[in-house]
Image (cartoon, rainbow, N blue to C red):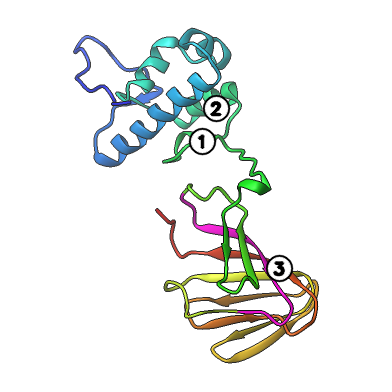
Amino acid sequence: MALRSGFLDSSFALPAEFSSPENSDDDLVGQRVALNLQRLRAKRQLSLDATARASGVSRAMLAQIESGRSVPSIKVLCKIAKALKVSVAAFLEQREFDGVAVLPARESKRLVSANGTFISRALFPFDVARQAEFYELRLSPLGEESSEGHGPGVQENLVVSQGVLEISVNEERYLLSTGDSIVFYADQPHRYRNPADSDVLAYLVMTYPERLD
């Protein structure tokens, strides 16, 4: 949906709770809030009047926010978020996310190695920008998986939930048993290897130095 644009009538004074967008950053925030408010309100099938009653924010204020012509204060945004039962952050997301996402296992994004011994499953909404990613890793007996390294500053934090896992970072080897964890910079060559005759189950958090887009 395209945002409407235009000038405010000169006789209309904005309430103190509002600020009029004055630069590109304010415009961007205003557009995100406007689109997400429209989306969240429509998803809950609430009219502007019903939202106003539930939040204590006037219908006129809500209409101004949804038009993208005004940026609400944090206080006002908190009132609206409480009424819609979402996090304040839900209004600032670039993609749809209400603050809670259930991810059925059957719909998870999976990466399987060519020989089928290594399986990585994403445990996060794959289409939402984020600075950290959470994965489930499975490695078959005597299987291994290598990486030449990720982008500069990327870190991996891994914990072994089941089995034994050998991790090599620049040829330095570390042997992890069940319950052991490791943190290392993953912008250098590294390898996972299962030295045992039983499967390995591990969980991995990858952290990027800045938010992914």
Write down the residue under mark 2: 81
Q: Earlier in the sequence, mark 3 or mark 2?
A: 2
Q: Check the picture and name the quadrant holding the N terminus.
A: top left
| Image side of residue 118 versus residue 5, left or right | right
Q: Is 107 above or below relative to 202?
A: above
Residue 105 part of the magenta-drawn span: no
Q: Is 205 above or below relative to 109?
A: below
User: Element type at marker 2?
Assistant: helix
Mark seen at residue 133: none
User: Is label 3 or label 2 in front?
Assistant: 3
User: Element type at marker 3?
Assistant: strand
Hey, what amino acid is under mark 3? Ala
Contact (Cβ within 8 Å) of mark 3 with mark 2: no
Q: CA distance from mark 1 to mark 2?
A: 8 Å
Contact (Cβ within 8 Å) of mark 1 with mark 2: yes
Residue 133 part of the magenta-drawn span: yes
Q: Earlier in the sequence, mark 1 or mark 2?
A: 2
- Residue 72 appearing in the image: no
Which stretch is magenta?
Answer: 129-144
Write down the residue under mark 3: 202
How many other residues sit within 10 Å of disc 3, few (<14), some (14-19) or many (≥20)?
many
* Residue 61 at x, y percent in the picture: 40, 16
Which residue is located at x 29 percent, y 25 percent?
A: 3
User: Element type at marker 1?
Assistant: helix
